[in-house]
Image (spheres, rainbow, N blue to C red):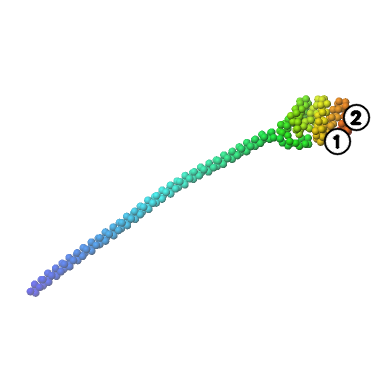
Amino acid sequence: MRMARLGLFRTLLGLATACFLTFNAQAGLLEDDEARRAILDLRQKVDASQQRLTDELQKSSDENAQLRRSILDLSNQIEVLRGDLAKLRGQDEQLARDVAEVQRRQKDLTQGMDDRLKKFEPAKISADGREFVASPQEVRDFESALAVLRKGEFAAAQGAFVDFIKRNPDSGYRPSALFWLGNAQYALRSYKEAIVNFKALLSLASDHLRAPEAALSIANCQLELKEVKAARKTLEDLIKVYPKSEAASVAKDRLIKLK
């Protein structure tokens, strides 16, 4: 009986041990599944995080690439603008040079026109102590006639001065022209014509620089014409009217010789 009870106890103890081991084995299996699930969840989370990080990195890389392209495009645009600006500056400089050249040409043209106009415009001149306005043509004609006289071409000089006086009756040169015309006629022995022109000078401008010489020339013409009495009167008037002139000194000597 005792042996039967001991066997039963051992059997129950064996069953209990087996149940315990089975329970422990099942508990271990349960714990392994949960761990695997936790690991899988964690791995999924890590994979998801890695994917998000990869996506973010890719997005950032794309944005950086886009930014670099934008910067490159902007740099190219800046270079194009610099080129355009350089061209504009060059065009401005060329335009400035063109404007300066046009201004220079305009100045030269204006100056040339002024110079040409001056050839025709009257100007103030001085002749035989008198100032007056004369045209360039008057000056040329008078000086030309005077040059002919100085060459000793008295007939040609007479014609030149007669022509000058006819064409310029109101010229400031008229008194001087009358004086030199009288001298040309005196040289040609045209004494009466010379006297007429010398007297015309005295009547027109008694204060002229050549007036005393004209009066003395009248006396000389009268002496050539044997008009001694008239010559003496002319010389006496010359001394009275122009007492300080060189012609008056000559007139005094002439009067002494005529006595």
Quadrant location of the N terminus?
bottom left
Residue 204 shows which numbered tag?
none
From the viewer's side, name the closer residue of 241 and 24.
Answer: 241
Residue at the image position 76 percent from the left and 37 percent from the top: 131
Q: Amino acid at mark 2?
A: Leu
- Foreground mark, 2 or 1? 1
Quadrant location of the C terminus?
top right
According to the picture, the residue beneath numbered tag 1 turns out to be 241
One can see residue 210 in this view: no
User: Would you call the spot at circle 1 few (<14 residues within 10 Å), some (14-19), or many (20 or more)?
Assistant: some
Whole-percent x, y for residue 254 in the image: 88, 31
Task: Say which element carries label 1.
Answer: helix
Q: Is residue 225 left or right of residue 103?
A: right
- Residue 258: which quarter of the image? top right
According to the picture, the residue beneath numbered tag 2 turns out to be 258
Q: Amino acid at mark 1?
A: Val
Q: Is residue 13 left or right of residue 33?
A: left
